Amino acid sequence: MSLPHAILTALLEKPSSGLELTRRFDRSIGYFWSATHQQIYRELGRLETEGLIRALPSAQPARGQKKSYEVLPAGRAELARWTAAPQDPKPLRDALLLRLRASAVVGTDGLEADLRRHLELHRGQLAEYEEIERRDFPPEKDSAQDRVRHLVLRAGIDLETFWTRWLAQALAELEGLPR
């Protein structure tokens, strides 16, 4: 149910074509809610059919021309309803943690290399988020919208910080185990 709401959010921030929307997803919303281009285009069609968005009139009608979409009042109302509705946290489901648990039974051979790989991936993502923070959230940028957007980015930074610390601890623990 969240992909339509992610699209409504992006379109309320800026009316866009499907292609522009998929590019914006790749640069922002996609960090925490991923979707394929095909899923986005399919959802645009559904949202338009449901009367939540509409294609903007084109300056020049042409076959195959990209459509730009905007959110209709019903779409804004749906997004407001959804943001105000309670939602329980999702339980953690991570294959790496399950593999680590299984290694307690079958041995840790080969696991350390993958933990190191994960650590480097998380360090890279953390560096990317920190660069976005430096670039996009200087201290003087503190409107209500900017502050809420920064909260989302801070969640990503905090999660990547957690993973980098935890993976470093896990590797240290595994290195200290008898062979």
Image: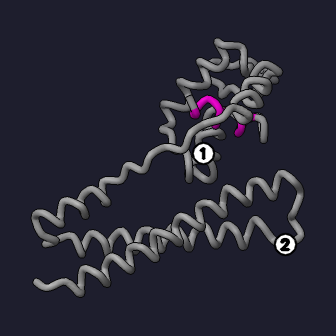
Q: In this view, does 34 lie above or below 69?
A: below
Q: What element carries label 2?
A: loop
Q: Which of marks 2 and 1 is in front?
A: 2
Q: Is residue 101 above or below residue 46?
A: below
Judging by the rendered image, the residue that carries numbered circle 2 is: 139
Please tell me how crowded label 1 is: few (under 14), some (14-19), or many (20+) other residues with Cα within 10 Å: many
SS assignment for the magenta stretch, majority: helix
Answer whether labels 2 and 1 touch (C-beta < 8 Å).
Answer: no
Q: In this view, does 134 lie above or below 172?
A: above
Q: Give the range drawn in magenta.
A: 2-11
Does the magenta run of residues contain 4?
A: yes
Mark 2 vs mark 1: which is more N-terminal?
1
Q: Is residue 129 above or below residue 49?
A: below
Q: Name which residue type carries label 1.
A: Phe
Instruction: Report, in whole angstroms, how far the alpha carbon at label 2 lies from the one at label 1.
Output: 25 Å
Could you say which is closer to the camera, residue 79 or residue 104? 104
